[in-house]
Image (tube, helix red, strand yellow):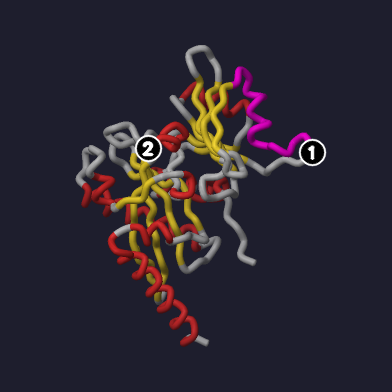
Amino acid sequence: MKRALGKWEQSVLFQQHPVLAKHIPETILYSEKNLIDFSNRYPSVFVKHDMTGQGRAIFKIHKSNDRKYNINGFTIQGTPIQKSVSKVSEIRLLLHPFIKLGRESGPYILQEDIQSYTRNGQPFSIRVHIQKLNNKWMISGMYGTTATSLATESGIVNPHRGATVMTISEIFSQTKFKNNEEDTVKKIEEVAITAAKAIDSVLPCREYGIDFGINQEGTPVLFEVNTTPGIMGFAQIENKKIWKRIVEIRKMQSESDESTL
């Protein structure tokens, strides 16, 4: 069984990399003390379960003027939640719903919200699919996701949690950055390949799905590398052209593996 690489282990790896360290949000292990610190320094922060995927167990938290902690997101079961609490200690029950049974749900991380928003204030993200063929990494494709009304509140942009998939050009038509689309896409590709090589050094895989945001200065910010990426999002755009390319490369990878046996 393939070993999983959690969000925290990825962050530590990237923090030590001279290039990737410039393209990641500030990240730290969750604790009540750290949440108070982050909430005092950032307009909003994300609390993410170290191992879950598909937008589950991720919460956006911001402290209001009345000093309450406003929470939007999805539970570990994927149920949407909107809640306001007065004490940080009350958040523990949301993160660990089985704590009354004596079971914690595993570690969480804290991450700054980098404010990756369209001109209309909708959060968006970019998924990059990268594959290794004949010892060379290649970008197979990328798409953008932007939030529906529910995801706008939580800031969690994931197709499994109500986000809308669209082409990269469609995403860029809704944003305004210092750099043009071509330059930004090129930088995303460079960072993605660098990240793939870094992850591959500790957890070799033939493909990765890499999630990016773009901050208000137009700099790509790497959120996470998925080591078992789904590709159904690509089937929703461009007449499945990218999806078909990914599937074809997978076949070529299998053929290449067989030829080395």
Which residue shows up at 41% across the image and 45% down it?
A: 163
Which part of the image, by quadrant, shows the N terminus?
A: bottom right
Residue picked out by circle 1: 101
Residue picked out by circle 2: 123
Q: Is residue 28 left or right of residue 20?
A: right
Q: Which corner quadrant of the image does residue 78 belong to?
A: top right
45 w.r.t. 20: above or below: above
Residue 197 visible in the picture? no
Q: Residues within 10 Å of mark 1 (few under 14, many from 20)?
A: few
Coordinates of residue 110 in the picture (x, y in percent): 54, 36
Coordinates of residue 89 in the picture (x, y in percent): 67, 24
39 w.r.t. 1: above or below: above
Q: Is residue 83 left or right of residue 65?
A: right
Which residue shows up at 50% across the image and 32% down it?
A: 60
Q: Please tell me which of labels 2 and 1 falls first in the chain.
A: 1
Coordinates of residue 34 in the picture (x, y in percent): 58, 29
State the residue in front, 137 or 147: 147
What residue type is disc 2 on?
Pro
Residue 252 visible in the picture? yes
Residue 96 is one of the magenta-drawn residues: yes
In the structure shown, which secondary structural element does the residue marked by tag 1 occupy? Answer: helix
Checking the image for residue 113, the label placed there is none
Q: Residues within 10 Å of mark 2 (few under 14, many from 20)?
A: many
State the residue in front, 173 or 137: 173
- What is the count of numbered marks? 2
In the structure shown, which secondary structural element does the residue marked by tag 2 occupy? Answer: loop
What residue type is disc 1 on?
Leu
Point out the stretch of residues depicted in magenta. 85-102
Q: Which corner quadrant of the image does residue 49 belong to?
A: top right
Classified by dominant secondary structure, the portion drawn in magenta counts as helix
State the residue in front, 105 or 37: 105
Residue 234 is one of the magenta-drawn residues: no
